[in-house]
Amino acid sequence: MERWLFTFFIGAILSLFLPIVPDISQVYICFCFAVIFCLIKRLRSYSGLFFGCAWLLYAGFVYQNIWQVNSLITDDFFGTTLTVKGVIANIPKSLTRKTNKDETTKQVSRFNFVVEEVNQQKLQSKINIRLRWDHKSVKPYHLKKVTKINQGQKWQLMVRVKPAHGFANVGGFSYQTWLRQKELHATGYVKHSAKNKLIAAQPSYRQNLYLQLNELIDSLALTNDLHHFIFALTFGERGKITAEQWQVLQATGTQHLMAISGLHLGLIASGAFGFILMFFSYSPFYLLLSEKGKLWVVKKNSRIVAFVFSSLIALFYAYLAGFSLPTLRALIMMQIFICAKLLGVKLTIIRWLLLSIVCIILISPFSLFSVSFWLSVYAVSLILLVIWRCRKLLLTSGDGKVEKIKAWLLSLMIIQLGLTLFMLPVAALLNHQLPLSALLANIIAVPWMSFTAIPLCLLAVVAMPFSEALAIFFLELSLISLTFIWQWLRYLSSQQWLFIDVNHQTLVVVLIITGLCFISYFLALPKKILVVAVSLTFLFSYVFVNDQQKNDDWQVSVLDVGQGLAVVIERHGQAILYDTGASYPSGFNLAESVIFPYLQYQGLTTLDYLLLSHADNDHAGGLAFIDKKVALNKIIVKHIKYNQPVEDVGRYSFVNMHSCKQGDDFSWQGLTFSVLWPVVIEDKENDNSCVIHISDGKYKVLLTGDIPHKVEKILVANTEIANTEIANQLKADVIVAPHHGSKTSSSTGFIKAVSPEAVIFSAGFMNRWKMPNKAVLKRYHQLNVTPYATAEHGMIRINITEQALEIQSYRLHIKPYWFAN
């Protein structure tokens, strides 16, 4: 059975490497092969390979063809105003923002909406969409009058939606993959309309408990924000946790404590199990029984009742958490274990783990997309391996209760220490940083939270319907507990020496050494072989790094930052950044979410130059963040004013600021950067865009900012003068399209003067300006220029060697898998 379960798991994994989801007929053929293999005794155990592959591809086909199932024409569905009816599926996350100078306040709600009807058409299969509702701006004292939306309510809404989509960049978070694993088919927003109306007002029981807890916490008049953690520990709602708190949690590797998972469910279920056993052992009813009666209770009924009760408690906790994916996974694993115990089925550890994984894939196939799924499997496997490796030590205990308690505590410490040590490389892989603080944080935070804050928070929720006073008592105790551990975590997060930045090359070395240590410890590899293997790893990594530094290849990466621009030029392990993407009033910043993770992944801690084309937010909005997080050697701008929350750049300490005007050329790492525009500063920002021509003597790239036709004509006119040097400076193999492909740019004369082989459009997916414009695309097509668009292809990377220029895209070459695109 283990072999079949394992092959099912492998088959599901292999299906992820396909570039597209096959047609349903091919999926059915895969199912047929699985059935045929089942009928052949010798091949039966391998039938799981086809079953696993077919099951995941079937789920992918159903997800991608939801529109066809419901007879919806996507061109009519996306980008138009729709009247939809459905149910709010989760507790809405609400944010309050100040909007403008008249001190009005806007409340923004985000929630998942299960659509049952579109434009009076009943759907055969429900569609899940992620919606944003920006309520009308009101004065702060009118905020309570804003429409309240709750989980479980049925609404009619006027919405505009787009298909599930996200930025696609190396090192960045994949929002599109996240939407898929949540089985969300589209995203959009609610339009202000009188047609928006509440159909069924009754919230869900979970929402009522959440609101009651919110009111209780408000009544405490707290002076700190630690109560945000209570919502995370009880309802799995982490939206209230502040950015500063997340930074501390990530720095200390304790963010897993705020996601209700196996630790939380296992702790609560174990507590419930122990409570029932104690109840049977010490209740007055038990004392009145005869010896035979007591023996019957202890041997049979007490454990059965304890397992059933702990199962129900775990189910209730999972319900409170909204059956989130981490919670659902833990619940499935726990229920399989409990069912095996109740039915008297003997499960080996390996069979239990594999059976749990297969059940998770059957119930929630898109769990495989989730990093947390792999972390869970890795963590559980580590725990089981540590228990197996240290079984002699863990099973050694004295006869007395004190000795047994000591042995139990020692076991927990050993498991926690082993788990934390082997999770450090994974943390480095995900965050491009080796947080040594995680070892010191988790060794204290995990047991402390397990025996204080987590059970106290849940007891408060359980007590709320019966006694608010008792619930408040538990809440106050949990806050005291959280205050203590939070001081420790904040202290660790402030110790910079505990954090080691790692690039992907260093990371490979760390992972190899960790793997060797893992094999040595668990499989008893001889120490001599381990020393030789580690030495060879360091030697090969040293040779590889030196080879990379001597390599004269260079890259130009146009990052996918939506409706904006950010270009990274790299050579010899050094980099230049051209533009920083946008920042928004909500606090979302493309420099933070896209550019900085990319630089971290590439191991770039310093920028030799930061070039700002002009002052518009979509090009310079991330300057403040880049200045704060990345060491800047030189910044080149055309003038000091730009569109940031504060109006002048003078508040930032740019020591080496240089102008960006025609003739301000410079050399860097053997490349020539020629500034072709502006000549003088104009009133319009787009007219001032800093146009830069990059050349290695053979291959050329042109960065144009947002220049309009007027500037293009001037640049073309310069090439018509009898000056071959100026004419050659405008020619390029690849051009980043002016103004994102706007109809006001990319004139035919300009394209002919540049004569590129390829053009890259940096524009937002289904943006309201419909860039790149169809007429512009037609011009490039007529001149045989190959178009690339970040909205369609994700990040575009130009790899330039001595022999050739090659263009790769994230979606087609770097990560060409169906689940990510």
Image (cartoon, rainbow, N blue to C red):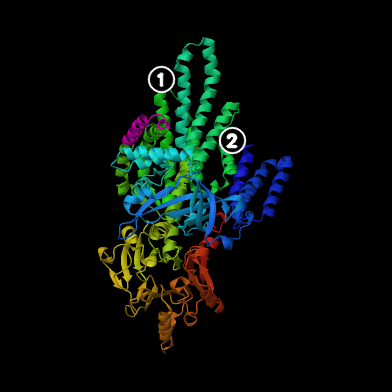
Label located before the other in sequence (1 or 2): 2
Task: Give the residue pinned by disc 1.
Answer: 401
The crowding category of the residue bearing disc 2, from other C-alpha atoms within 10 Å (few below 14, some 14 to 19, many at least 20), is some
Question: In the image, what residue type sits under mark 1?
Answer: Lys
Q: Report the span colored magenta.
A: 462-481
- Queried whether the magenta region covers residue 471, the answer comes back as yes
Task: Name the side, left or right, on which 676 lies relative to 374.
Answer: left
Question: In the image, what residue type sits under mark 2?
Answer: Arg
Can residue 820 be seen at all in this image of the molecule? no
Residue 220: image quadrant is: top left
Tell me whether circle 1 and circle 2 mark residues in contact (CB < 8 Å).
no
Q: Quadrant of the N terminus?
A: top right
Residue 40: image quadrant is: top right
Q: Position of residue 527 (x, y in %)?
A: 46, 41
Q: Quadrant of the C terminus?
A: bottom right
Which residue lies most toward the top here?
Answer: 290
- Queried whether the magenta region covers residue 295, the answer comes back as no
Q: Position of residue 444 (x, y in %)?
A: 35, 36
Question: In the displayed structure, would residue 409 be above or below residue 380?
Answer: above
The crowding category of the residue bearing disc 1, from other C-alpha atoms within 10 Å (few below 14, some 14 to 19, many at least 20), is few
Residue 351 numbered tag: 2
Element marked by disc 2:
helix
Residue 236 numbered tag: none
Q: Position of residue 544 (x, y in %)?
A: 45, 59
Which residue lies most toward the front here?
Answer: 194
Residue at position x 39%, y 36% from top?
Answer: 446
Element marked by disc 1:
helix
Can residue 615 be seen at all in this image of the molecule? yes
Q: What's the CA distance linking mark 1 and mark 2?
A: 33 Å
